[in-house]
Image (cartoon, grey):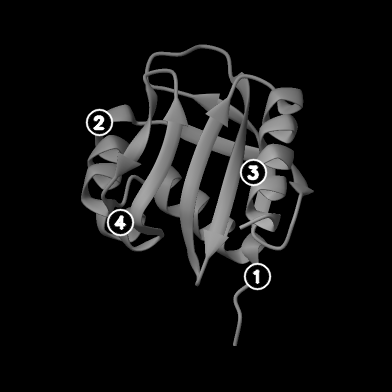
């Protein structure tokens, strides 16, 4: 039975927001492609779990944009320890076989939707 991308991404949010490193590692593929303020790259599930522990980030989703069967852009309100106001961010998620295999965080939804559309078109031509 296929697990919906929304279910997979909801589990990802739950694991991140709880700070549960084992659950976070289980929610992502190996490797996990990431993009954020510190750059882009591939990391292991263990490295992702350690980032969850170190960052203390909380991501509250408030809008979902299905781009393709495997790509979803989610708008979040993000907070970190010591932050006073949430910051609006958007993440392009790629889901495969019940796990998040890419989490590409951008500063706004327009950028995220453009990147997701590029990713969709690239995947369609493989």
- Residue visible at 25% across and 31% down in the picture: 54
Numbered badge on residue 25: 4
Mark 4 or mark 2: whose residue is earlier in sequence = 4
**Would you say residue 62 is visible in this rendering?**
no
Disc 2 element: helix
Crowd class of label 3 (few under 14; some 14 to 19; many from 20; radius 10 Å): some
Numbered badge on residue 4: 1
> Which residue is labeled 2 in the image?
54
- Residue visible at 44% across and 43% down in the picture: 17
Disc 1 element: loop
Q: Are marks 4 and 2 in contact (CB under 8 Å)?
A: no
Is label 2 or label 1 in front?
Answer: 1
Mark 4 or mark 1: whose residue is earlier in sequence = 1
Quadrant position of residue 109:
top right
Q: Are marks 2 and 1 in contact (CB under 8 Å)?
A: no
Q: Are marks 3 and 2 in contact (CB under 8 Å)?
A: no
Disc 3 element: helix
| Quadrant in the picture for the N terminus | bottom right
Is label 3 or label 4 in front?
Answer: 3
Disc 4 element: helix
Q: Residue 119, relative to residue 7: is it above or below?
A: above
Distance between the alpha carbons at the discs numbered 4 and 2: 14 Å
Distance between the alpha carbons at the discs numbered 4 and 1: 19 Å
> Which residue is labeled 3 in the image?
119
């Amino acid at each position: 039975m296929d697990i919906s991308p929304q279910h997979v991404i909801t589990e990802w949010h739950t694991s991140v927001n709880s700070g549960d490193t084992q659950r976070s590692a289980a929610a992502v593929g190996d490797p996990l492609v990431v993009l954020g303020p510190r750059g882009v790259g591939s990391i292991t599930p263990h490295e992702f779990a350690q980032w969850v522990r170190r960052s203390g980030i909380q991501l509250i989703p408030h809008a979902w944009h299905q781009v393709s069967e495997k790509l979803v852009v989610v708008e979040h309100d993000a907070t970190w320890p010591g932050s006073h106001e949430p910051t609006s961010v958007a993440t392009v998620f790629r889901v495969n076989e019940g796990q998040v295999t890419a989490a590409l965080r951008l500063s706004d939804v327009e950028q995220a939707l453009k990147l997701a559309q590029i990713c969709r078109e690239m995947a369609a031509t493989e």
